[in-house]
Image (cartoon, coloured by chain):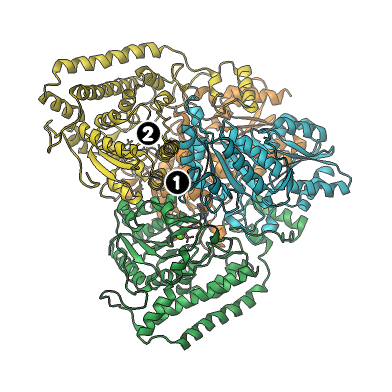
Chain colours: A cyan, B orange, C yellow, D green
Amino acid sequence: MAEITIVQAVNDALKEEMTRDDDVVVLGEDVGVNGGVFRCTADLHEMFGDDRVIDTPLSESGIIGAAIGMSLYGLKAVPEIQFSDFIWPAFDQITSELAKFRYRSGGQFTCPVVIRTPYGGGIRGGHYHSQSPEVYFTHTSGLVVVVPSDAYDAKGLLKAAIRSPDPVLFLEPKKIYRAPKMEVPDDDYVVEIGKAAVRREGTDFTITAYGAMVEVAMAACEKAAEKGWNGEVLDLRTLVPLDEESLIASVTKTGRLVTLQEAPKFCGFSSELSAIVAEKAIDVMEAPIKRVAGFDTPFPYTLEHVYMPHADRVLNAITEVMTY
Amino acid sequence: MAEITIVQAVNDALKEEMTRDDDVVVLGEDVGVNGGVFRCTADLHEMFGDDRVIDTPLSESGIIGAAIGMSLYGLKAVPEIQFSDFIWPAFDQITSELAKFRYRSGGQFTCPVVIRTPYGGGIRGGHYHSQSPEVYFTHTSGLVVVVPSDAYDAKGLLKAAIRSPDPVLFLEPKKIYRAPKMEVPDDDYVVEIGKAAVRREGTDFTITAYGAMVEVAMAACEKAAEKGWNGEVLDLRTLVPLDEESLIASVTKTGRLVTLQEAPKFCGFSSELSAIVAEKAIDVMEAPIKRVAGFDTPFPYTLEHVYMPHADRVLNAITEVMTY
Amino acid sequence: MTATEMLQIIGESGQTVGDHETDLTPDELVAMYEAMVRTRGLDERMINLQRQGRIGFYVPSTGEEAAQVGSGTVLLKDDWLYPSYRMPGTLLMRGVPLRDMIANCYGNEADNCFGRQMPVHYSFAKQNIVSISSPIGTHIIQATGTAMAQKLRGTKEITAAFFGDGGTSSNDFHSGLNFAGVWKVPCLFICSNNQWAISVPIEKQTASETLAQKAVAYGMPGVRVDGNDVLAVYKAVKEAAELARSGGGPSLLELMTYRRGPHSSSDDPTRYRGNQADEWLTRDPILRFRKYLERQDLWTDKKEKEATERIKNECNALVKEIEKLPNPTTESLFTDVYANVPPHLREQYKHLVETEGEGHEPDPDAAFPL
Amino acid sequence: MTATEMLQIIGESGQTVGDHETDLTPDELVAMYEAMVRTRGLDERMINLQRQGRIGFYVPSTGEEAAQVGSGTVLLKDDWLYPSYRMPGTLLMRGVPLRDMIANCYGNEADNCFGRQMPVHYSFAKQNIVSISSPIGTHIIQATGTAMAQKLRGTKEITAAFFGDGGTSSNDFHSGLNFAGVWKVPCLFICSNNQWAISVPIEKQTASETLAQKAVAYGMPGVRVDGNDVLAVYKAVKEAAELARSGGGPSLLELMTYRRGPHSSSDDPTRYRGNQADEWLTRDPILRFRKYLERQDLWTDKKEKEATERIKNECNALVKEIEKLPNPTTESLFTDVYANVPPHLREQYKHLVETEGEGHEPDPDAAFPL
Ligand SMILES: Cc1ncc(C[n+]2csc(CCOP(=O)(O)OP(=O)(O)O)c2C)c(N)n1
Ligand SMILES: Cc1ncc(C[n+]2csc(CCOP(=O)(O)OP(=O)(O)O)c2C)c(N)n1
Ligand SMILES: [Mg+2]
Ligand SMILES: [Mg+2]
């Protein structure tokens, strides 16, 4: 067992999968000699050479398009988008092409590209280095969307993603890239895609979260516990396909739901959770479903700490559903 | 009063606004001499010339980027994206630029571009000429998103959009571009952005819809009436900013909600409606909130009629909420 | 050959221009001609079926047969192709069964893509013909990626991407050629400059004097060819393919031709172009090549008639057979979104079958406008 | 001047190369030099503040002062600029108050953008300096649009877009230059080829021999200039501006320079580049121009010292004043998303104030890595 960060977990997963499978190829801006601006691809260039760790021109559209072409041929391309805020030039490739190849070709052509990209706030990156774009992809049929919240999952889910026959968007919560460290087995392991994890068992209310918001949810539950409210934290881990069963099971037990996300609220991912519960389990609900989310504004720079959801804000929502 | 189609309404709105305001400029693929592949810009080239009705190279990114640059300078650019399925190359310009200029510049720079684009199924266009992309834009703070459902609104809302200080995505339901015709006043009028319309008053259940789905909702209500259920149809018309008040008022009255959209269900626009109701009016609900939507697959060609929501499918959902 | 001059081998009257000698045997020449006739025959039949409302949409390639056949002659079995929607001829030459192409246009049970895409959006994995999509240009960078994979694997294969003049304005023309130049991959970028992108003429598409010279921006050779001259196309593509195959990297080829028909079955070109077409009507690539063959006694009226009848009969027989097949199954709506059908799609399918059986009737009014 | 040769007027030792005579007066020359010194002075102060943790991020432009000042000298008051993030010098020359630039880097109450963007993402409408955004390349096509508007309105104004070598790979470099070529708009596309895009060297960015020759693909002139030679930059930009202003259309200029420092305050270039920087360290554009001026007795050590002190003092005074100002108001989070604050944002603001007052404390660990 080694104590590692999420950055290290991602790096280890890449190293292991590239060693295991010669077809795995990494490409992106600054992923080569530089090892990635967050160091997630450190050492890879030295270990696997120019052919398998490729610095690209500055074009996200090109990165994803080329990755698709490689994967159609049989390679396993794992492109990095430097910040998820810069993924939009590739959105056509992702939405029109990557997500639809298998379907439109009647299963003849598949391109199981794994797009890795850091997302989210908390690093004082302002407008264009802080956004949480998950919902733009979760609405796009054909994509798998994964968001780990700790080093163990980051490694196990990334390895699972690389072995998956489907295209995966792998969102890395950069706020917690380097902290806290976590014990991770030295042996090969994968974490199954499509399964949520109960991070804290509770009976009074449920909080859903993913990525960097999981620790915020945990902290909020600690505070709620002081008031005698025993919360359950559901870390979604995979957004598509969603582990609906675990969601319904948890709210059926608790009867109260607070959803938590960094992304703006309106039409955010959490809205889908509300909709599912309102469609399938409205009867068990003992209070309104409260959403804690980013404001419906662009992401600010100086006032990031006011913008981003934090434990006290979540506690307010918990209080609302508990005292309803 | 003239009897006109939605195509004609759009065309009239453009003619009138271009006549009223010399700064209004139309650009896009085939909008010039050809008058647009759906004829929405017919005659404009003849009336206003090469300078104000501009055929562009085949680049959506270029069309929207150029429109932004024109509008920053003070023109009022009204670009057309030939099919909304082809808007993705411009998604970076729309999401990173158009939506954020006012905010990021502290209000110094504004670019109130109005993007017109046909969307939706029902024309046997398959995969890439049928999609309903509204939710990719409704999650993007800074954009106004409008979807008319008839000729009167198409004209009045487009004129309002062109006069609006905010960037607007104007989604035209191409399934009903040419039918049915509708009487529209000859005088100048606008329809206020941000207000839903009750298309049918009812007391037993509410259906929300927009664009081409409004007539499907109406038809479903007719069928429901035969069973003695009196439905209310709320045509949202503007998705952002949403007329939440009308939504809450309607479900408060009826206690039952069926949402209707063509777009895939998962993380679709209707999920937000469920979430709002679950957050603000869960107590008034007497049944689960049912969503009728496209399946979570790409849009098919041959089986389009199976894919798209139709009145009987909506009636099934109505029956579910009414017999709950 | 250069980016601004135009390679021509056969003149308008079928005479050889300059001192070119072809490396093609008489049999090969005849086979190329027959492929051109087949291409037009298929097109004509499909246009006809579309007019009769028996298929929903079609894209004719009339006048662009030389570009298709000249390119198709060069590419080898293992090479990968990213075609445009306007090149049935090349697909036929690669051994795609005529039946499969017609079936695609019907989009019924016989379609290998389960009627998921519009007509002419073919996918033929067996022939390394990558699924065609509607968005213009996206495949160009994908071709670069595939060529990179071929290079990394150390094969002798090459990849070819085909697109139109309009396609050169797309984002992924830029990324595709730029990446290919840097990576020096075995990829041919073959542009059919038919001078129109729907109603937009080439002068409104780019101020570049030629499309071939855009290659300069990416550090690769650019070649301009008379795209109505099948032997010129053949020669240029062959040389570029040899360069690519031997590690010399990518090339951009501009095949000068003309879109004689409408953009598609939904388009009415009289709205936007006057008589320009007339001058080009006389420039028929098939006629030109026929004159060339006749000068060498390789072709006769009789053969022409036979070849024309043959493709017509083949098409008719296949149409008859395919037309009566049923639609794809409702289940096919939900498969292939992912490798395995995930729970939410299984639920949606189940609900559909339970509540609607095999589903709703088609809307008779639905018709594609473009 | 051509796309493959490189225009140079001042040699490395300050001597005049060739037979060039400048149209600049001695006063103008000195003003240009002072602007270069000011640029470096501001940069040095800001880098320093960033190292001390007093501002969160900075992008140095060390070594690229000639490109900034040479261009800045040409553009007129009414012209529109779409700058990159690496050109404070041009902004200062356009009359942007030093105070406003420093305030932006602090992102507090004094910032005209309410601290909404990271440092160096300036917006100065009064000076027609369009809001800088992080996504690379998006502004290039916007500049084309603005130039089109200028043309349609019949003004004599021009627009200039500035970007780096990496920016030439972006989608909107392609659309921007392509549209500009077709529309023949008065737009200058000025590329600072500093040979690096973070860690990616120019050879991995494009196989094009020069960046200037990419102009060929868009039917516009391309010019390559020694970007460390302020007079060469001035001359090339001036000629291109005159062409544009007189209806001759757009140009692409490649200014050859070098990114001497790190990409940004978050970057460590020792990770990816060896000694290549050393050779370029001797090629300082300020030193070169100073030698030129000294040869003509237009500059002295004393003046140098005064100019350096002056900018230092100005910066220090402003920093002192600005640093103690409070953050922007919480309300500023919600304004300017739309022209008017819509109901849902009003509700979110109200809820925030009611439940959290002025909000939460900042996270002391948050630090920008790039
Ligand atoms: C991204 C995108 N934008 C617009 C369209 C609509 N469209 C279909 S074909 C076409 C013109 C293509 O012209 P060109 O590339 O010259 O090919 P050609 O049809 O002439 O063979 C357009 C604009 C599209 N399919 N994709
Ligand atoms: C679309 C996009 N992708 C990636 C980035 C991250 N990034 C910021 S600057 C930069 C390199 C830019 O290089 P260049 O254009 O040469 O300008 P320079 O920094 O050298 O002045 C990159 C990759 C970005 N800002 N935008
Ligand atoms: Mg064309
Ligand atoms: Mg650079």
The residue carrying pointer 2 sits among few (fewer than 14), some (14 to 19) or many (20 or more) residues within 10 Å by Cα, namely: some
Return the x and y of residue C294 as percentages of the image width and height: 12, 23
Which chain does tag 1 point to? Answer: B
Q: Which residue is mark 1?
A: B187
Q: Is residue C72 above or below residue D155?
A: above
Can residue A52 be seen from the camera position used here? yes
Q: Is residue B254 something one can see in this rendering?
A: no
Task: From the viewer's perspective, tell me whether residue A129 is left or right of residue D257.
Answer: right
Q: Is there one chain holding both mark 2 and mark 1?
A: no
**Which quarter of the figure has residue C103?**
top left
Quadrant of the image occupied by residue B74: bottom left
Residue occupying the point 34% across, 67% down: D237
Q: In the image, is residue D129 above or below residue C302?
A: below
Q: Quadrant of the C terminus of chain A?
A: top right
Q: Secondary structure at mark 2?
A: loop
In this rendering, is residue D360 above or below C215?
Answer: below
Residue A265, image x, y percentages: 66, 46
Q: Nearer the viewer, residue A84 or A16?
A: A16
Q: Which mark is residue C156?
A: 2
Q: CA distance from mark 2 to mark 1?
A: 69 Å
Which amino acid type corresponds to the residue marked 2 in the rendered image? Lys
Looking at the rendered image, the quarter that the N terminus of chain A falls into is top right
Amino acid at dot 1? Asp
Using residue B181 as the reference point, say whether residue A113 is left or right of it: right
